[in-house]
Image (cartoon, coloured by chain):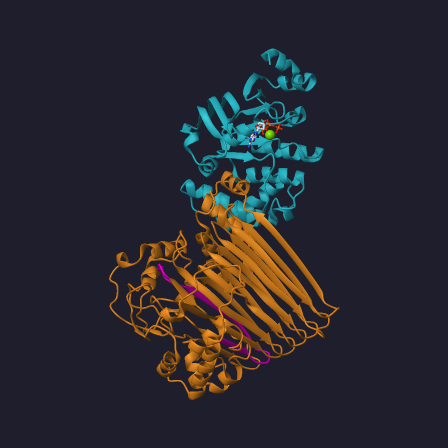
Chain colours: A orange, B cyan
């Protein structure tokens, strides 16, 4: 998404366009054991993997869709989804005129050059973004450079083939398939995703990134990401997401698991820009994601940073289980909702080890007719002595037809815990906008400035190029929402 | 430079400005005085283009352009600067970043390239010195947590940075301590040139001791009811507004 990131990922033989007609190699619609066998066979999986999927599927059948989130939507028809779709290259577009003009407008706003727009739109031949498109991981770059350090960075499917011992050991160890409805579904039908292993004592020399894209219509995307940092390892991992505009809702139900061993650290950053639906609330992605990390051993650290601007409905709580003593969990989040978007997002910090610390900074921005909820749980278990948590949840309202809600849950079982919670709600003022305009700054730039100021603490946590992109994205998402 | 003719403006259906006439030429300083609620801030807001006010009658010409047709940001880019009576806080946006954005927007409007970083920094330093603004304030979020006086000083600092053609100072003196008043007024005087003009809105003669006006106007109930030389301010200070009320038969 960011120019730089894209550039890194361009090069190679991938010839698929952005929203272009891609003839896909699809599974038939619907979900049953045969479909799961089909997916597993397509991916040439070993028997144990198939067994895992089937167990998850059978368990999923016993579950009801969760209803506790502060969102309302028409329940997806799980028999009306294509669970496997592998894009095949087809004809290329010949000029930018054939590309969805809305998409081009967005590119322009993001400051992506015409040349790059062409590549992105599939007009020119090469777009090898490191992406998981629909169901299949398309390309993983820099694999060789990384493997010199012993770092494994590959598609999930490849890891199942090449590193079965790691997959068997860690997959489902943080998010078991019994965890929740969508985690069970994902475990049954996941098609691809990314895998990353940082060996003992290795600091990953570059940011690793995955770019997810849903392309084919009627498909769901169920990717899995598994990141393991062994003793003393470090990695900063980026995830970007987009989807084309379609009238119907599409389902995205991913699972991300992170494991850190002794003294290891993982930073996971997301800029989520799934298609949010149109101004009337038609279409858009249902984003039901389970993300969780475990600080398995002492002195390890996991931090989640997310900028969420897309999706029609978001249901997402990147969490950390602080098991090792002195481990640290962080959650920095900006969630923007506009028009008819709904987001119910937050985090869970589960303190089990001694002297564990967690920080939660959540910035919600609601505009239009949208609803934005923060839902957070801080749990301090008995024996987690001297645990500390600091939470700050701010909401910014733009206009008076949107809603912001905060649901903080705190469970403290150890008397030595120190837990602080702060919350504010403010409105973006006509006064602030007028003040900016009076200094020569137009409405759009003024909103960008004000909103970026409000989100500064979170944006500062993003890697540089991602932060720049996120800033632009915030401005684009909120365009036309005030004044 | 500025020509206001028969200006009527209302808010929420209530008429506040009831036929204002005002001519300001380049190089001049005009003072506007008048009792609370007479419409001074309204006039400055209408000049700056605040959309809440509806202009129902009259015209404003600024450097030959019909000001009423311009958006607030374009008015600013044309060189109108309003030092707010109540400056606004913008959390998380540093003063420096705010000013850089503003300055470059104004430059872009004039077809100029963004200012080079080192030139910008030099200008920042110079203007900071001019109004003796604490360096720390420049790096803090715009007006956030500033004291009342610091906010006012920051307005003049911004004015110095943006170098406007017409500056409107709405009660910039209120909230300033005696030393600050002298410093801020000194800054305004140094920024004065034959090409720019200043409208000073104030309740007190003491500011006019420092910023000496060419003309003093009395705004009363939405109209300029009296204009005169700087001595008029002294007379007002002495007698209050009652004699004006009598004069205009209100
Ligand atoms: N939104 C509004 N709705 C109704 N009346 C308003 C509104 N805004 C301002 N007014 C009225 O307009 C009148 C003029 O206000 P304005 O702020 O221009 O006065 P002023 O001359 O600047 O006063 P002061 O010396 O106290 O600053 C006041 O009576 C005020 O109550
Ligand atoms: Mg006033």
Q: Quadrant of residue A157?
A: bottom left
- Quarter of the rendered structure image containing ligand 2: top right
- The relative height of residue A39 versus residue B115 in the rendered view (above or below) is below
Q: Nearer the viewer, residue B171 or A73?
A: A73
Residue at image position (59%, 24%) is: B38
Is A246 contained in the magenta span?
yes
Q: Is residue A214 left or right of residue A265?
A: left
Does residue A286 appear in the picture of this structure? yes
- The relative height of residue B192 versus residue A144 in the rendered view (above or below) is above
Q: Quadrant of residue A388?
A: bottom right
Q: Is residue A127 left or right of residue A457?
A: left
Does residue A155 appear in the picture of this structure? no
Is A343 contained in the magenta span?
no
Q: Nearer the viewer, residue A1 or A276?
A: A276
Residue at image position (39%, 78%) is: A32
Q: Residue furthest right?
A: A415
- What's the magenta region? A225-248
State the quadrant of the N terminus of chain A. Answer: bottom left
Q: Give x and y (percent) for residue B200.
A: 58, 28
Residue at image position (42%, 34%) is: B70
- The relative height of residue B158 versus residue A204 in the rendered view (above or below) is above
Q: Give x and y (percent) for residue B219.
A: 57, 21
Q: Give x and y (percent) for residue A126.
A: 31, 68
Label count reads 0
- The relative height of residue A2 versus residue B193 in the rendered view (above or below) is below
């Amino acid at each position: 998404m960011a120019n730089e990131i894209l550039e890194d990922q361009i090069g190679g033989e991938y010839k698929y366009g952005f929203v272009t007609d891609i003839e896909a190699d699809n599974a038939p619609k619907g979900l049953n054991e045969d479909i799961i066998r089909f997916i597993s066979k397509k991916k040439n999986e070993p028997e144990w993997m198939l067994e895992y999927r089937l167990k998850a599927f059978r368990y999923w059948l016993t579950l009801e869709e969760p209803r506790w989130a502060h969102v309302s939507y028409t329940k997806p028809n799980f028999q009306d989804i294509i669970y496997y779709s592998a894009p095949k290259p087809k004809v290329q577009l010949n000029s930018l005129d054939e590309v969805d003009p809305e998409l081009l407008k967005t590119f322009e706003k993001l400051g992506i050059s015409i040349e790059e727009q062409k590549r992105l739109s599939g007009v020119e031949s090469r777009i090898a973004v490191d992406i998981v498109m629909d169901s299949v991981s398309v390309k993983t770059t820099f694999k060789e450079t990384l493997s010199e350090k012993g770092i494994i960075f590959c598609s999930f499917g490849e890891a199942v083939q090449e590193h079965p011992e790691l997959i068997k050991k860690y997959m489902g160890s943080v998010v078991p398939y019994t965890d929740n409805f969508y985690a069970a579904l994902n475990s049954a039908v996941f098609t691809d995703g990314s895998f990353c292993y940082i060996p003992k004592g290795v600091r990953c020399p570059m940011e690793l990134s995955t770019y997810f894209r849903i392309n084919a219509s009627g498909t769901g995307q169920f990717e899995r990401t598994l990141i393991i940092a062994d003793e003393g390892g470090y990695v900063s991992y980026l995830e970007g997401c987009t989807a084309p505009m379609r009238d119907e809702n599409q389902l995205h139900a991913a699972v991300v698991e992170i494991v850190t061993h002794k003294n290891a650290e993982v930073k996971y950053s997301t800029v989520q820009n799934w298609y949010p639906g149109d101004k009337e609330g038609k279409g858009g992605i249902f984003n039901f994601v389970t993300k969780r990390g475990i600080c398995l051993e002492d002195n390890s650290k996991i931090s989640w940073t997310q900028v969420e601007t897309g999706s029609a409905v978001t249901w997402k709580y990147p969490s950390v289980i602080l098991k090792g003593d002195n481990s640290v969990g962080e959650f920095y989040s900006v969630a923007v909702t506009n028009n008819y978007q709904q987001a119910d997002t937050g985090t869970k910090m589960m303190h089990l080890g001694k002297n564990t610390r967690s920080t939660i900074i959540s910035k919600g921005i609601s505009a239009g007719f949208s609803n934005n909820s923060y839902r957070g749980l801080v749990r301090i278990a008995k024996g987690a002595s001297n645990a500390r948590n600091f939470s700050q949840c701010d909401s910014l309202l733009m206009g008076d037809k949107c809603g912001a809600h905060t649901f903080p849950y705190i469970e403290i079982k150890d008397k030595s815990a120190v837990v602080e919670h702060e919350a504010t709600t403010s409105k973006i003022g006509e006064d602030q906008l007028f003040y900016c305009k009076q200094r020569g700054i137009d409405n759009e730039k003024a909103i960008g400035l004000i909103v970026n100021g409000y989100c500064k603490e979170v944006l500062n946590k993003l890697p540089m190029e991602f932060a720049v992109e996120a800033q632009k994205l915030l401005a684009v998402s909120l365009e036309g929402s005030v004044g | 430079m500025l020509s206001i003719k028969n200006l009527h403006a209302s808010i929420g259906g209530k008429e506040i400005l009831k036929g204002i006439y005002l001519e300001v030429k380049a190089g001049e300083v005009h003072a506007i005085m008048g009792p609370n609620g007479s419409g001074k801030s309204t006039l400055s807001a209408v000049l700056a283009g605040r959309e809440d006010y509806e202009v129902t009658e009259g015209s404003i010409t600024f450097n030959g352009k019909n000001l009423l047709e311009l958006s607030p940001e374009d008015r600013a880019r044309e060189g109108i600067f309003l030092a707010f009576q109540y400056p606004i806080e913008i959390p998380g946006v540093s003063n420096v970043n705010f000013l850089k954005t503003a300055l470059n927007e104004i430059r872009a409007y004039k077809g100029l390239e963004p200012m080079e970083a080192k030139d910008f920094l030099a200008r920042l330093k110079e203007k900071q010195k001019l109004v003796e603004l604490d360096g720390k304030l420049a790096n803090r979020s715009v007006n956030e947590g500033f004291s009342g006086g610091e906010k006012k000083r920051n307005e003049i600092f911004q004015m110095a940075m943006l170098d406007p053609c017409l500056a409107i100072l709405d009660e910039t003196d209120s909230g300033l301590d005696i030393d600050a008043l002298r410093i801020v007024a000194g800054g305004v005087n140094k920024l004065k040139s034959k090409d720019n003009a200043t409208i000073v809105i104030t309740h007190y003669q003491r500011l006019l001791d420092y910023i000496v006006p060419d003309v003093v106007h009395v705004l009363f109930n939405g109209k300029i009811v009296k204009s005169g030389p700087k001595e008029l301010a002294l007379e007002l200070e002495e007698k209050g507004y009652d004699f004006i009320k009598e004069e205009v038969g209100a």
